[in-house]
Image (cartoon, rainbow, N blue to C red):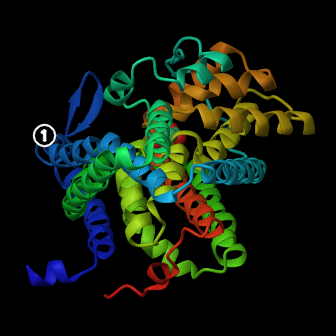
Amino acid sequence: MAWWFNRVLWQRVLAALILGVIVGLAFRTFGGTYMLDGVTKYAGADIVTTWVKPFGDAFVRLIKMLVVPLVFTTLVTGVISMGHPSKLGSIGGRAFALYICTTLAAVSIGLAFGVVFKPGSGVDFTDVVPNVLAGEAPGFTQILLNIIPDNPVNALASGNMLSIIFFAILIGVAILMVGKKSQPVADFFNSFVEIIFKITNWVMELAPFGVFALITWVTAVKGVETFSSVLILALALYLGCMVHIFLVYGGLIKLVLRLPLIRFFRGILDAQVVAFSTSTSAGTLPVTIYCVQSNLGVKPVIAGSVLPLGATINMDGTSLYLGLLAIFAANAFGIDLSWTDYALIALTATLASIGTASIPSASLFMLAIVLPTIGVSAEQTALMVGFILPFDRPLDMMRTLTNVTGDAAVATAVAKWEGELDEETFRKVATV
Ligand code: ASP
């Protein structure tokens, strides 16, 4: 027991990830197979789905349970702690500029890797069942209008992140403006955020078990064959994301901010592994907030605003993937791409990634925005989604990890520039 608790969390979480892969593969390999409707099924995967996956689901529900209270209270207390609301503008401006820059870098890397790896060449769509995309996306004006909640309780209940951010900022600013009379409410929020943080702390202790259960399940059900079916695409995505993480975020942390890179990656490893195992950056949000505040020393005002906003609109792994998929479609359907096409893909993929929901496989459904710009028809897009969807999970895991790493990197940068980074915490060497 002491051996377990003496290890820092990231080591336990990482061990759980590796163990999950081994156990998942063991169940898949040695559990036996049977046929159902002409399809080979894995008995070991069924056992894992019934007995192991529920533990992973419980963990995901526990983190999701914390999203709304944590985001709301961290943001309100963050604004209160600023002392003056004018700072919000510069935080938002800097965060937004960085989101756009990193996303454009990501989509460019995706396009470059697409050109080199040529995913989609020679793909045969004959047996594919088309997957028709969901209805119309809301217009730009509607998206902006939706930020203002017509009922804040509804916004909180449905987890509408942008509306929650909007309302929390208003409450925080009003508390500052009212002054002395609002002190009891300010005290309430300051105390409530401590309580939610305590619960987050408990849930984090369960992370190794949740990660183990989720990874065992993904490996037992999908196996490594899933990778081989879309091998070139998977390879390009994994390598592209790694290059983006080390070059763009690494460059930002090490060269621009002059902070120790190893500390950054060590500090956010728990969030990365949880993102990897759950495939949802919105679901990972409490863990990201927790890691960035406790391990990297980012103050609540930044963690509470930049991270929820980032989880909603900053998705570099997703934009990189959309760039790759556009090249995949061009190769599969024999479309020659000009420089203008590449620029159009970069632009639409950036916009689409901003609008992508932070839930599993959400980016595939954004292809409807990107692909028409290069002349891919709606039917062809449906075919592509139908082809990739069954193999998407292992790809989603990597892009969600990248999305979350990007949010943490931007939060660290904005915190440093705003003087809201406790560098002593950031530089503290982990005890084990
Ligand atoms: N699953 C990703 C996320 O939650 C979105 C996507 O690329 O599908 O960040």
Relative height, residue 301 to residue 358 (above, below): below
Q: Residues within 10 Å of mark 1 (few under 14, many from 20)?
A: few
Relative height, residue 89 to residue 370 (above, below): below
Q: Which quadrant is the N terminus positioned in?
A: bottom left
Q: Describe residue 428's horizontal placement relative to residue 63 as left or right.
A: right
Residue 388, position in %: x, y? 52, 33
Q: Describe residue 362's horizontal placement relative to residue 221 as left or right.
A: right
Residue 93, position in %: x, y? 69, 49
Q: Which residue is mark 1?
A: 50
Say if disc 1 is inside 8 Å of ligand 1: no
Q: Nearer the viewer, residue 10 or 152?
A: 152
Relative height, residue 171 to residue 208 (above, below): above
Mark 1 residue type = Thr
Outermost residue on the right side: it is 339
Outermost residue on the front side: it is 180
Residue 365, position in %: x, y? 55, 26
Q: How many marks?
A: 1
The residue lying at 66 percent from left, 67 percent from top is 417
Residue 33, position in %: x, y? 20, 41
Question: Helix, strand, or loop for circle 1?
Answer: helix
Q: Nearer the viewer, residue 413 or 121?
A: 413
The part of the image, by quadrant, that contains residue 375 is top right
The residue lying at 53 percent from left, 44 percent from top is 309
Q: Describe residue 342's horizontal placement relative to residue 49 as left or right.
A: right
Relative height, residue 293 to residue 196 (above, below): below
The part of the image, by quadrant, that contains residue 81 is bottom left
Viewer can see residue 121: no
